[in-house]
Amino acid sequence: MKSDDIVVCDIMLLRCPTVLREDNLYQDKRYSFLRETSRWEVITPAQMGIVTFRFVREGWTPAQLDTVNQRIVDEMIADGFAMISTTSLRGRTVLRLCTINPRTTEDDMRETMQKLEELGNHLISH
């Protein structure tokens, strides 16, 4: 190991608590974006840069919502606006968003959530 490597490790160790505190504050803000509309159900609250949530519509079956949530992600990826993935939790398809990039802003998050909601609203209207 070079002496430069040790310095880098020391810097990272010293900065880590600050980064985690900032990350937790940021996660709280992202969670609030999801609560601004009735279209989203938070499945797992934001932790360490990852949040899972689901587009919902009253009166739709869980299977119909699984299809809509998968299509939202497929269309977002095809559009190239943002990268988002799905996962299965408790047998349901949910959206999984990970924003560990420190350059991701609140505006980026808000625009992404607006785009996701627009896609969902479009899909349920057809």
Image: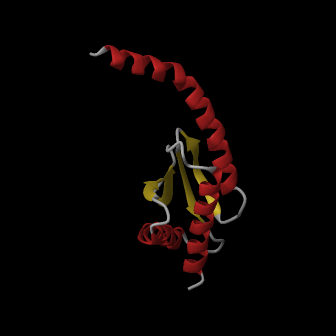
Q: Which residue lies furthest to the front in this view?
A: 4
Q: Can residue 114 be seen in this view?
A: yes
| Residue 112 sits above or below residue 119 on the image | above
The location of residue 34, given as percent across then percent down, is 65, 56
Quadrant for the N terminus in the image:
top left
Q: Which of 7 and 68 is in front in this view?
A: 7
The residue at the point 64 percent across, 74 percent down is: 59
2 horizontally vs 39: left or right:
left
The location of residue 125, given as percent across then percent down, is 60, 83
Counting the numbered discs, the total is 0
22 horizontally vs 89: left or right:
right
The residue at the point 49 percent across, 61 percent down is: 82
The residue at the point 55 percent across, 72 percent down is: 61
Dividing the picture into quadrants, the one containing residue 6 is top left
107 horizontally vs 7: left or right:
right
Q: Residue furthest right?
A: 36
Q: Which residue lies furthest to the bottom in this view?
A: 126
Q: How is the image coloured?
A: secondary structure
The residue at the point 60 percent across, 73 percent down is: 118
Quadrant for the C terminus in the image:
bottom right
Dividing the picture into quadrants, the one containing residue 26 is top right
The location of residue 66, given as percent across then percent down, is 48, 67
13 horizontally vs 53: left or right:
left
Dividing the picture into quadrants, the one containing residue 25 is top right
The location of residue 78, given as percent across then percent down, is 41, 71
Q: Can residue 60 be seen in this view?
A: no
